[in-house]
Amino acid sequence: MTSMIKTGMLMAALTAVFMVAGQFLGGSNGMIIALVIAVGMNFFAYWFSDKMVLKMSGAREATPVEAPVLHQMVARLAKRADLPMPKVYIIQQDTPNAFATGRDPNHAAVAVTTGLTNILKKDELEGVLAHELAHIKNRDILISTVAATMAGAISAMASMAQWAMIFGGGRSQDDDTGGGGIIGSIAMMILAPLGASLIQMSISRSREYQADATGAAICGHPQSLASALQQLEIYNRQRPMNVNPATSQMYIVNPLSGGQLANLFSTHPPMQERIKRLGALTLANRSA
C-alpha cells in the first residue's frame, strides 16, 4: 500500500467519523449538516490556513537581502525538487525548528527559526529545508491542515453533545431526529474525539516518514537530515517553543515538551524510527 493510498483511506475514515458524529448528534439531518460543515471548513482551510499558521507562529517574511544564504539554499533545493521558489519566513526563536505551509507548490512558504540557522551545519540545514520542500512537493500541508480542522470540529461537536445532554436532561432524540439518544451521545462524546485524534496522528506520522524519504532524495545526503533531526529533538526537549498547540504538527520535530504518555499520541513519529529509516536510505545509496 503506497503512502498516498494510505493517507486517502485515513482521510476518508476521518470524514466518516465526522458524519457519524453528526448522525448521533442530530440524526440524518445532523449527518447532512456535518457534511456541509466539513466541506465549508475544508474550503476555508484550503484558502486561509497558511496565513493563519504564519501569523500564529510570529513568522516574518525575509527578503533575499536580509537572508541571502538562506534564500540561495532554498532556491537551489527547490530547483532540484522541480518546485517553484517558495516564500521564506523567519521566526525569532532560539530553539531550532522549521515548518512549511501553503495550499499548493505555487502558494507555499518555508519558515525557519533563527536558532535553526545558527546551530546547524550547512549540510544539516539543507537536510531540514529539503524535508520542508518535500512536504510542499507531496502536498502534505493541505492534507494535515484539513485533518486538523476536521479533528477539531469533531471535538467541538462532542462538546455540543455534552451541553445538549445537560440542557436536554438526557431526553432521547430517536423519535424526533433519528439521533443516537443518550447512549449514542455518550459514546460519541468519548469515542469520536479519540478516533479523530488517532486518525489525525496516523495521517501526520505517515506524511512525516514520506517527507523524510523525499527530503533525503532532494538534498542527496540522508545522514545529514538524520543528524539534524537528532539535534532538533534534543534542543526542543530542553527548550520547548512557545507555540500554539494547534500548529505543533506543522513543525519538523515536536516543538512542545511532553511525557511518555503524550508521546504516544504525538502527531510526530518516534525520532529513533525516523533516524533508523534515514540510516537505511544511507546504506542503500552507498550500495547503489
Image (cartoon, grey):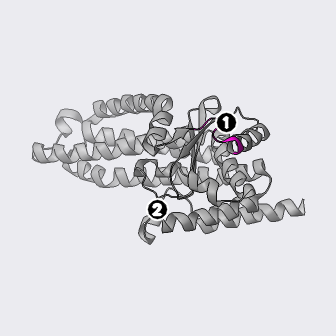
Percent coordinates x, y for residue 264 in the rendering:
47, 65
Residue 219, labelled with which disc?
none
**What is the magenta range?**
62-69
Earlier-in-chain disc, 1 versus 2: 1
Q: Are marks 1 and 2 in contact (CB under 8 Å)?
A: no
Q: Nearer the viewer, residue 245 or 261?
A: 245
Secondary structure, mark 1, is loop
Q: Amino acid at mark 1?
A: Pro
Which of the 4 image quadrants contains residue 180? top left
- Reply yes or no: does residue 208 show up in magenta: no
- Reply yes or no: does residue 68 show up in magenta: yes
Q: Nearer the viewer, residue 36 or 116?
A: 116
Percent coordinates x, y for residue 265 in the rendering:
45, 61
Q: Label 2: few (<14), some or many (≥20) within 10 Å? A: some
Q: Amino acid at mark 2?
A: Pro
Q: From what the image shows, is residue 167 above or below residue 279? A: above
Residue 46 horizontal side relative to residue 192, left or right: right
